[in-house]
Image (cartoon, rainbow, N blue to C red):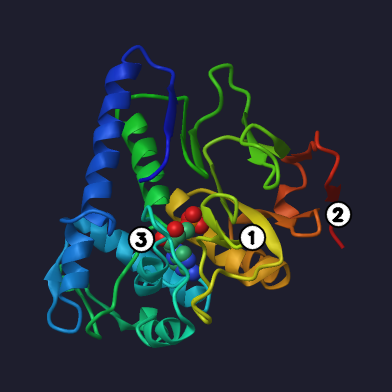
Amino acid sequence: MGTVVIQRIYHKEAEKIGEKVKKRIAEIEAKMTINKPGGEINALNDTSGKDYVVLGDDTLYVLDKARHFSDISNGAFDVTIGPLVKAWGIWSDNPRIPQKSEIDELLELVDYKDVLIDKDNSRAMLKKTGQVVDLGGIAKGYAADEAINIYKENGVESAFISMGGNVAVLGGKPDGSPWRIGIRNPKGSQGSYIGIVSVKDKTVVSSGEYERFFEKDGVRYHHILDPKTGYPAESDLTGVTIVSDLSIDADALSTATFVLGLEEGMRFIEGLDGVEAVFITKDDKIYITGGLKNIFEFKDESKEFEYVEKR
Ligand code: AMP
Ligand code: MG
């Protein structure tokens, strides 16, 4: 999935369980990626505009979740962003800036409402030829949820998994205290944090322009696209972190909220049950949703950020 996976499992068979998780992650990637040939999502994309394709329960579940979050975010998250992700070459070795005319043409193909899901027959179809589903903004979250399920099935009571910007924890730390998850400083190096959330049985998922980008003529182009324009989202945020129960939800929501920006994103997340967020703005301010007051600790070693208490 284009990232490093770190697992901490407290159990006498930790290594065996960790291997099971690795296998499951590889399986999910093989089924759902669009960056390598084969798999179910490629089959769905290759048959766009023509026919339904039978999908496994897991792929269907992720696709259905992706369509749901596309819907409730009003298309800020759009699972059919694939043609643009490919045109920009975000996951390739040679990213490029497409012509405006090319972008405008491809934008015609971006519409999550064209993802037709026929649950009774375990199949799905994309309405228009050339449409491409990209689960890159949500599949890591699903993989993290699956990891937690595997830990539970194997009798683990305390575990941690991190995959790029996605963290999920089972239980608390072995001593019973909450896990302390650092929220990365978007402007700093990988080890520098702006704060910590203390959680048990939760997921903490971040999206930000620092995660993947390329530079051309001094301009930085990042990997989260605005489905309305086809260009990297001109968000007033540099990063956003979602705290919730399911990592698949948090993953889609972090990508969506980044596109929405501070004001709309705050309204969006405050309107959802059981979901909280930390917002980091381009002008170095930090905002949180109400439910995080007691579990978020502002801790900025760089002294560049200002913590804004809620209005
Ligand atoms: P994340 O790192 O979870 O925020 O997801 C970013 C990835 O999701 C990108 O690398 C693309 O593969 C894909 N993506 C980019 N923009 C969007 C969008 N607006 N909606 C859905 N997926 C997107
Ligand atoms: Mg995401």
Residue identified by numbered label 2: 308
The residue drawn where x is 41% and y is 57% is 138
| Mark 3–mark 2 distance (CA, rounded to whole Å) | 34 Å
Along the line of sight, which residue is nearer the eye, 193 or 114? Answer: 193
The residue drawn where x is 59% and y is 54% is 208
Left or right of 151 in this view: 264: right
**119 shown above or below 182:** below
Along the line of sight, which residue is nearer the eye, 142 or 192? Answer: 192
> Where residue 96 sits in the image (x, y, percent)?
44, 65
The image quarter in which residue 19 lies: top left
The image quarter in which residue 87 lies: bottom left
Q: Of helix, strand and loop, which one carries label 2?
A: loop
Q: Of helix, strand and loop, which one carries label 3?
A: loop
- How many other residues sit within 10 Å of disc 3, few (<14), some (14-19) or many (≥20)? many
**243 shown above or below 22:** below
Q: Are marks 2 and 1 in contact (CB under 8 Å)?
A: no
Amino acid type of the residue tagged 2 in the rendering:
Val
Left or right of 278 in this view: 90: left
In the image, is the residue at mark 3 within 8 Å of ligand 1 by its beta carbon? yes
Residue identified by numbered label 3: 135
- How many other residues sit within 10 Å of disc 2, few (<14), some (14-19) or many (≥20)? few
| Mark 2–mark 1 distance (CA, rounded to whole Å) | 31 Å
The residue drawn where x is 26% and y is 47% is 28
The residue drawn where x is 39% and y is 80% is 110
> Where residue 109 sits in the image (x, y, percent)?
35, 83
Amino acid type of the residue tagged 1 in the rendering:
Gly
Residue identified by numbered label 1: 218
Q: Of helix, strand and loop, which one carries label 1?
A: loop
